[in-house]
Image: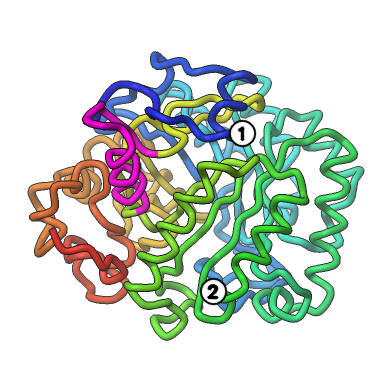
Amino acid sequence: MPDQPPVSASLHAQAAKERGGHDARMMHIDFNVSPFTVVWEVTRACVLHCVHCRAVAQRWRHPRELTTTEGKQLLASIKEFGDPILVLTGGDPMMRPDLTELIEYAVQALGLRASLTPSSTPMVTRERLLEVQQAGIKRVAMSLDGATAEVHDAFRGHRGSFERTMNILADLRAIGMPFQINSTVTNINVDTLPALMEHVRASGAVQWSVFFLVPTGRASAEQMVSPERHEELMHWLAELSETSSFDIKSTAAPFYRRVAITRRRAQAKGEAVTFAGAGFRYQDGLDRPMQGVNDGKGFVFISHVGEVYPSGFLPVSGGNVRELPLPRIYRESQLFRDLRNPDLLKGKCGACEFREVCGGSRARAYGLTGDLFAPDPACAYTP
């Protein structure tokens, strides 16, 4: 992929450049050696009952959850990768009583850049947010899946979740904590996305991370939108990114990069282009990658009991951190090595000219076909 920033940078990219700048040295990572993002599911416990929960969260912490000591050992092994972005997620990470201790160790002792994704429960008070902020959290991600309480609360399986989320966002603004909003697209809320986007705009979020459903956990194929609707949404998001005040990121839809690149090529008159937002560091220190991240390629996920997955949506384990160090699993396990080999892709994903930067969602291919290397069923593009 070309080693240069976007030809016609969007407003959010320009703002990011002004705040933090573009540092190519920080963006070029050999994904065979180190991931760009490491996600640790610190617990699967959560009091919500979201209809699409990939973790199939339970109300109680698992008895074999990684201990505080094991968690610190894991964090030290993450630091061996260099300077990846660490995401502490769940379940609801606020349900771990040692969460602040783990954050302090990760950030203050090891120098990792960490973000947090709590659930919208009464545990997320302004005082608790200040506590994790002081411990070193750089950004908080909150889920918002509907523009109204009716839609969002139905998603989350808990009445009052929408109102609580709005209150948490207000608290984040009050304490000056950067935050992003995560939204999962399904056939339940797809028609309300423009209204949802307006909530994101008004909230002051630095990023809208738009997740596209993968049938795993409680999520089912029936909840997915069609390939044609996926394609329409990719173009809508790409167009929106050119004028929005916030960054836009797709999750589990790597073909967004194809759409963004194709649109930029049409405007660039032969000049090299890259995908939207690539290679910028934001004020809170969290970057956008120069390369295309995919399941197991620049991304690794550690479960609450130490299983190492290519992503949280792809429940095929490459090993367990209780038995092997995380860097060894990521670098040497056959699963991860195969996922980083584009020659193993099948069908139209294998033949696609965008297979290096996209490669299709391996999680969705596996979730719908049982084949890690099958074409992404959500992609409408024919190479």
Residue 93 or residue 61, whichever sits in front: 93
Does residue 189 sit above or below 199 in this rendering?
Answer: below
Whether the residues at callouts 2 and 1 have beta carbons within 8 Å, the answer is no
Asked whether residue 66 is drawn in magenta, I would say no
Q: Label 2's element?
A: helix
Q: Where is residue 91? Give x, y as percent.
A: 62, 61
Indicate left or right for 186 with 127 as reference.
left
Does residue 180 sit above or below 81 in this rendering?
Answer: below
Identify residue type, mark 1: Ala
Range of residues picked out in magenta? 256-275
Q: Where is residue 120? Give x, y as percent.
A: 76, 61
Q: Estimate how packed mark 2 is, as few (under 14), some (14 to 19) or many (20 or more) residues with alpha carbons within 10 Å.
A: some
The residue depicted at 37 percent of the width and 52 percent of the height is 256
Q: Which residue is mark 2?
A: 190
Does residue 111 sit above or below 346 in this rendering?
Answer: above
Q: Label 1's element?
A: strand
The residue depicted at 75 percent of the width and 81 percent of the height is 150
Q: Which residue is mark 1?
A: 114
Indicate left or right for 264 with 111 as reference.
left
The residue depicted at 79 percent of the width and 60 percent of the height is 165
Residue 81 or residue 15, whichever sits in front: 15
Indicate left or right for 351 with 43 as reference.
left
Q: Give the alpha-carbon distance from disc 2 to disc 1, as whole Å.
A: 30 Å
